[in-house]
Image: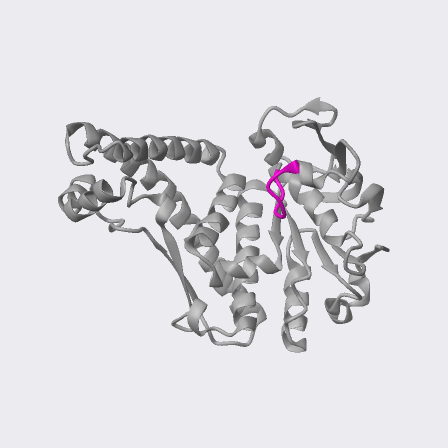
Amino acid sequence: MRLQRMTCTNFRSFDKKSVTFDQKKLVFIEGDNGSGKTSLLEAMYYSCFLRSFRCASPKQMVKFDQQAFHISLALEDDQGQPLTIEVGFSADKRIVKMNGKAVESFKELVDHYRVVLMTEDDLSLVTGSPEQRRSFLDHGLLLIEADYPQQVRTYKKILEQRNAFLYQGGNPSNEHGTVWTRKLWDQARLIQQARAGLLAKCQERVNKLIQRYFDDPITIKCSYQPKRYNQQQSYQEFLDSSIALFEQEKRFGRSQFGSHLDDVLITFANKRSRLYASRGQQKLIALLLKIGLLQEITDRRGPTLLLLDDFITDFDPTRQKQLAKLIYELDTQTFFTHPASCPLQQYLAPETAPCIVKLAD
């Protein structure tokens, strides 16, 4: 898959902005702060997930004093055929079209167009709350497993109903309560198994990348950690060991176990990355996890775009050279944003010349 051209109309600061990417594997988007570099990546991202990574409401992406925005992508699909995707938003209504026909579902869209994004905020994958690490896995699974969005919706509905039952004074261990407990436990296991499986694949890919491209004799380990119970437990074993847990649920009036509370432990050279890795090491871990995820999505679903929003600056020249080789050899089209000339460019061979897009204020 290659993104060849994109047009944004009344999107963020753009009246109408058309950009051509020349079929290049590497695209460097350069410009001063406020020139719209990140907005171009946001348009690519929104056209996949139908939500922004910068704001909660699409209204915030409409240019000031306008009522609607429109994004148009011209691509070459996985089979080398022309593909157009159009996304429009107006008055709380969103319209998505593919080759001129209305798209009815998220699944239909990601069957043809997928992106993985990396921004400075993704450092929280290592340093932030458990929610950030769960979100990393969930975003990947949305692109990989067709039924995962429905699994998540089902889980949220069960959790909401069980929480309402507990809030009203329900007993999670009586006959009525155990119906909701079993439903939540079963649905949580489906999500946990999917997350743990993807995490194991990402860990394997990350360590292969380290062995191939970096001199460091280190290993990154990622362990999925359900809260409150052991993944190996049967449902009956969980019930038998959860008397104190259920008392706590009655006291707080909400569920104290489930996939919405889980975390991922990431270690770097056998130490907790969040506590002991340097900022540069944390950034490298986060980037490698994203690249490992991209490789897994590509293998299981097809080519996927990599979007890197000004994420190379903090790396030293040795790391930049290693990353330039790694990223160029990925089987994907990669988009970088950077205020000036991208530092990776100096490490690329002449035959690998990127497409350079320069934006002005």
Q: Which scheme is used to colour this image of the protein?
A: one colour
Where residue 88 sits: x, y (%)?
72, 31
- Quadrant of the drawing holding the N terminus: top right
Frontmost residue, 204 versus 14: 14
Q: Is residue 261 visible?
A: yes
Say which residue appears at 57% left-offset and 61% top-offset.
287
Q: Is residue 268 visible?
A: no
Query: Is 29 above or below relative to 149?
Result: below
How many numbered badges does the structure rendering display? 0
Point 78% across, 40% down: residue: 64
Q: Classify 277 as above or below 7.
A: below
Q: Is residue 236 magenta?
A: no
Q: Magenta includes 55? A: yes
Residue 38 vs 90, above or below: the answer is below
Q: Residue at x 71, y 54 (%)?
A: 335
In this rendered view, identify the residue nearer to me: 336 or 348.
336
Q: Is residue 42 left or right of residue 190?
A: right
Relative to 303, 360 lies left or right: right
Nearest to the observer: residue 297 or residue 160: 160
| Residue 317 location (% of width, % of height) | 68, 76
Q: Where residue 285 appears, x then y in whole percent?
A: 52, 65
The secondary structure that dominates the magenta segment is loop
Measured as percent of width and height from the top left, residue 138 is found at 47, 44
Q: What segment is highlighted magenta in the picture?
A: 51-58
Q: Quarter holding the C terminus?
A: bottom right
